[in-house]
Image: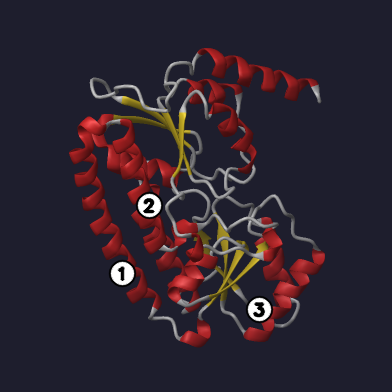
């Protein structure tokens, strides 16, 4: 093992053995947290959004991953390990999204409560592409109806941690669930503006399959489901030919993926005598900046849908 990895592993074990002790009792029950604010560490911005909405003033949430951060490639720093070990609970997306944090979460399990917000999604509703090596596609938040399951999971996990405030968590969850239900109806209404034959969504990586299934789009990504896989020349060539053959008006960049690859596809399409536009940038594995509409889950979804609809109707490309 390289020296840097060995040092990191030793730090992980040391911090978890000292800072985390006592947060999980021998019988697995949570300690009484009713008299103080609950310290939570979350991974992606989408998870942070859920925990903050349900927890309200009862929780203090530290999100590890900010705007533009790719969770597929994210590695915990020493500061992250210390923050994780000092938390009352850790909330993460799961389904192998935070692949490089899996070992840290596994080691934390006996010291700090860890919760995957996707645990309650029926496995029959998950996609398991053969190319993803037996794992489920983790990008479930692009189907708003599936993300509502994650919301319910956060409610249940917070109640388990802090049953004294169960009524608050149920009330907050119910209010946000109504917003998500309305958001799902809005997405369906907006996407229906695109004629069925034009509903082809081409993006930088294969993150939008749940969106496509839920709202009636064919989806193609240059990279695989995980951005850890790299697109080669043949991938660019094949995708460019598909776009030219189908006369797709727009393709889309992503906020957490370098635009170079999708720009290479655009050039390859133009070499085939078809002018495809870049319809804009979508938020895929991360949301926008805090304090902006796109820095919230509903705002991110609305931005993506407006961008997709506008691009496929060719209402202003680059």
Q: Earlier in the sequence, mark 2 or mark 1?
A: 1
Q: How is the image coloured?
A: secondary structure
Within 10 Å of disc 3 (Cα), the crowding (few <14, some 14-19, many 20+) is many
Gap in angstroms between the C-alphas marked 3 and 2: 30 Å
Query: Which labelled disc corresponds to residue 84?
Result: none
Q: Residue at x 64, y 43 (%)?
A: 73
Image-quadrant location for residue 122 = bottom left
Q: Is residue 264 above or below residue 92?
A: below
Q: Residue at x 81, y 68 (%)?
A: 234
Instruction: From the image, tell me which residue sits under label 2.
Output: 297
- Tell me the number on the disc at residue 243: 3
Across and down, in percent, residue 299 comes to 35, 55
Quadrant of the rendering where the N terminus is positioned: top right
Q: Which mark is residue 186?
A: 1
Q: Please, what secondary structure does the residue beneath circle 1 have?
A: helix
Residue 245 at x, y = what percent?
68, 85
- Give me the C-alpha separation between circle 2 and circle 1: 14 Å
Q: Element under label 2?
A: helix
- Image quadrant where residue 244 sits: bottom right
Quadrant holding the C terminus:
bottom right
Please, what secondary structure does the residue beneath circle 3 have? Answer: helix
Q: Nearer the viewer, mark 3 or mark 2?
A: 2
Which of 78/194 is in front? Answer: 78
Q: How many marks?
A: 3
Query: Quick check: 274 left or right of 92?
Result: right
What percent of the width, then of the height, locates residue 310? 44, 73
At a point 74% along the width and 60% down the height, the residue shown is 231
How far apart are the alpha carbons under marks 1 and 3? Answer: 28 Å
Q: Earlier in the sequence, mark 3 or mark 2?
A: 3
Q: Give coordinates of residue 89: x percent, y percent.
A: 42, 30
Tag 2 near tag 1, CB within 8 Å: no
């Amino acid at each position: 093992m390289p020296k840097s990895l060995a040092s990191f592993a030793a730090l992980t074990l040391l911090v978890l053995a000292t800072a985390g002790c006592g947060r999980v009792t021998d019988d697995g029950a949570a300690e009484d947290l009713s008299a103080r604010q609950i310290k939570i560490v979350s991974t992606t911005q989408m998870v942070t959004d859920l925990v903050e909405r349900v927890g309200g003033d009862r929780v203090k949430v530290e999100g590890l991953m900010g705007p533009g951060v790719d969770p597929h490639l994210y590695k915990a720093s020493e500061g992250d390990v210390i923050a994780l070990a000092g938390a009352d609970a850790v909330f993460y997306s799961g389904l192998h999204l935070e692949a490089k944090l899996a070992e840290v979460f596994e080691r934390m399990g006996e010291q700090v409560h860890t919760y995957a917000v996707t645990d309650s999604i029926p496995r029959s509703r998950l996609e398991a592409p053969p190319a993803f090596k037996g794992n489920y596609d983790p990008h479930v938040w692009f189907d708003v109806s599936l993300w509502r399951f994650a919301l319910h999971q956060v409610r249940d996990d917070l109640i388990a941690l802090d049953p004294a405030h169960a009524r608050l968590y149920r009330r907050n969850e119910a209010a946000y669930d109504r917003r998500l239900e309305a958001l799902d109806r809005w997405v369906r209404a907006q996407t229906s503006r695109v004629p069925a034959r034009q509903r082809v969504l081409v993006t930088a990586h294969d993150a939008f399959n749940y969106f496509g299934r839920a709202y009636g789009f064919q989806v193609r990504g240059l990279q695989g489901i995980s951005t850890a896989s790299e697109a080669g020349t043949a991938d660019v060539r094949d995708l460019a030919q598909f776009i030219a053959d189908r006369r797709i008006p727009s393709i889309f960049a992503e906020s957490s993926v370098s635009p170079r690859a999708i720009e290479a596809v655009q050039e390859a399409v133009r070499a085939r005598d078809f002018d495809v536009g870049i319809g804009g940038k979508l938020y895929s594995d991360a949301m926008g900046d805090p304090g902006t509409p796109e820095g919230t889950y509903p705002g991110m979804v609305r931005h993506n849908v407006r961008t997709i609809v506008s691009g496929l109707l060719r209402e202003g490309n680059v």
